[in-house]
Amino acid sequence: MGITSRMVPTEDASARKREIEEKLKQEQETLSFIRENMEKSDQLTKGMVSILSSFESRLMQLENSIIPVHKQTENLQRLQENVDKTLSCMDHVISYYHVAKDTDRIIREGPTGRLDEYLACIAKIQKAVEYFQDNNPDSPELNTVKARFEKGKELLEAEFRSLLTRYSKPVPPILILDAITVDEELEVQEDVVLEHLPEAVLQDIICIAGWLVEYGRNQDFMNVYFQIRSNQLDRSIKGLKDHFRKNSASSGILYSPAVPTKRKDTPTKKAPKRPGYDHDLRVKHPSDALTEKHGAAAGKDDVLDIEIDSYIHCITAFVKLAQSEYVLLAEIIPEHHQKKTFDSLIQEALDNLMLEGDNIVSAARRAIMRHDYSAVLTIFPILRHLKMNKSEFDTTLQGTAASTKNKLPTLITSMETIGAKALEEFADSIKNDPDKEYNMPKDGTVHELTSNAILFLQQLLDFHETAGAMLASQETSSSASSYTSEFNKRLLSSYICKVLGNLQLNLLSKSKVYEDSALSAIFLHNNYNYILKSLEKSELIQLVTVTQKKAESSYRELIEQQIQMYQRSWLKVTEHLTDRNMPVFQPGTKLKDKERQVIKDKFKGFNDGLEELCKIQKGWAIPDKEQRDFIRQAQRRVVSDAYRAFLQRCANISFTKNPEKYHKYRPEEVEEMIEKLFDTSA
């Protein structure tokens, strides 16, 4: 066992030794392989280094050969570029010398129809001018291109004038009326656009104006602009005025048929129908004074109404057209010149309107000098319209000269002054109208002074706010700022009461011209009644009662007084029917001659008085049917009752052999005779 155990380790050691020797041998083989590869690698490296060294040497040789060539080529390229630039500059400079020749045809033919091409041509000339000024100011070419530039500018200015002149047309009256008409039935008004120039033409004009300002250093075109447009504005307004004159009188077409309108601001054309009066009372139309200038015997009222309508519409048209002109102007004229140019543009049309307004004032002044104060009524619709539109007028003229802005206020002041003067002088004329016998109505009807005064006040009522402000404008007791609508209303009420008071005093004085006190009473009755009915039928009574609360009852008292005064005229008839001097007798007793004569005288006095009064008073007039019937019935009742009573007392008295000689009328016949009083046709 011992031997076996010793042999096992020996075999293991040998095996291990062999294993190690085999590994060593493998390692040596690997090392040998690595050495061989390293030797090959070294050889390859040495070969590569040799190759690279050779390549480097060759590159250095190549670089030393190429760099001089490259530098030479670069210099040649730079020289080529310089030559090209020089040639280009030479061509550019030479082109300036040829500009005059190249642009000659286009400049000569002008810009019409080819504005863009023309402006491009002008731009070339302008650059040539700048070149020669900077580089060769003494060259003759500079003068040539300068002259060509000025010629081109002149032709642009001429084109600007030509386009404006050719395409600027007056706005047709129908279109103006459409633009200024207000249709009260439409909730939203449609704005009518006033196109003054075709769009293409407008763009050309704007382009030319811009060039003239920026490059032409020229402002003369602005004068050309306002002169041409000013003329068209004035012609547009005159065309509207002619439209009224030509069409209104013949056809009555005052307004554009395109838009229904409501007539406003026109004076009352016809006298309002007098309440209860059935025949003409010789009323003179209050507008006759101003119509005398037209020289037309017939239709003067219509002509005047057309003139007033025309002027009112022309004022409105001016505002609308001026606003439209400013919109157009703002597209063409530089901003800092717009207000001044606009001011110049509107002057002619505005001056003509103001002159026409002054003529209206002058005509009213002349009429007042002739004591035709009713002519002032023509001013009222115009004045009201001017004041209603003053704020829009002021807005339109904003930025214009003070003298321009003050024209409308000056006209308004003139109208207010002459109007207030006419009102005051009218009131005085009512008071001082002379009592001329030939001017008194023979039938005791309403006097012309009364009818004209009431008509004047009624027409004044249509413009009560304007009239009140007119009177207030002459007040010096307080500043204008303190004037209120209520204050103006009280002033107008006081004025109307003053006129009525003066009229009452004058009528009382005139009534004394009649020799017959009964006719005088009828005259006053008719006039007072006419005044009262006229006040009641209009809103005048409301104005009067502002300052005179009992005016209505006062007139009723006056009317009643005159009725009583008239009834006294019948006392000379009815006094014969009284018991005074009537003989006392017993039935069956024979009367004495003296007593019979008394009864005969009473019958004769009654008959003669009745016949005389009926004959005279049948020719008198009480136009108011209600009053006429009332007075007749009252008088018929009084006379008839007294006559019946008298006949009854004399029924059984034998005072004559011919009773039919004295008892001429039955009571029914007396009543019929009285029923025919104040009836010229009976």
Image: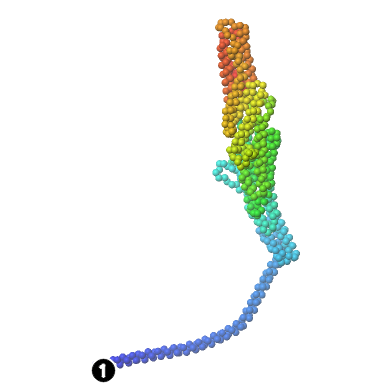
Corner quadrant of residue 433: top right
Q: Residue at x 67, y 21 (%)?
A: 515
- Residue type highlighted by circle 1: Ile
Q: Position of residue 375 (x, y in %)?
A: 67, 35
Q: State which quarter of the image contains the C terminus.
A: top right
Q: Residue furthest left?
A: 1
Please give the residue where the numbered disc 1 appears in the rendered image.
3
Q: Nearer the viewer, residue 520 or 230?
A: 520
- Does residue 213 lie above or below 83 as drawn? above
Picture coordinates of residue 55, whole percent (x, y) = 56, 85
Give 197 or 24, whichever is nearer the viewer.
Answer: 24
Residue at the front extreme? Answer: 477
Total numbered badges shown on the rendered structure: 1
Quadrant of the snapshot with the N terminus: bottom left
Query: Which picture quadrant has residue 70?
Result: bottom right
Q: Is residue 557 above or below residue 328?
A: above
Residue 563 visible to an observer of this rendering: yes
Of 133 and 577, the residue lying toward us: 577
Label 1 neighbour load within 10 Å: few <14, some 14-19, many 20+: few
In the rendered view, would you say 236 is above or below 370?
below
Question: What secondary structure is found at the residue carrying circle 1?
Answer: helix
The colour scheme is: rainbow
Q: Is residue 559 above or below residue 174?
A: above
Residue 64 location, x and y as percent? 61, 83
- Say which quarter of the image contains residue 645: top right
Residue found 66% across the figure and 35% down from its top: 422
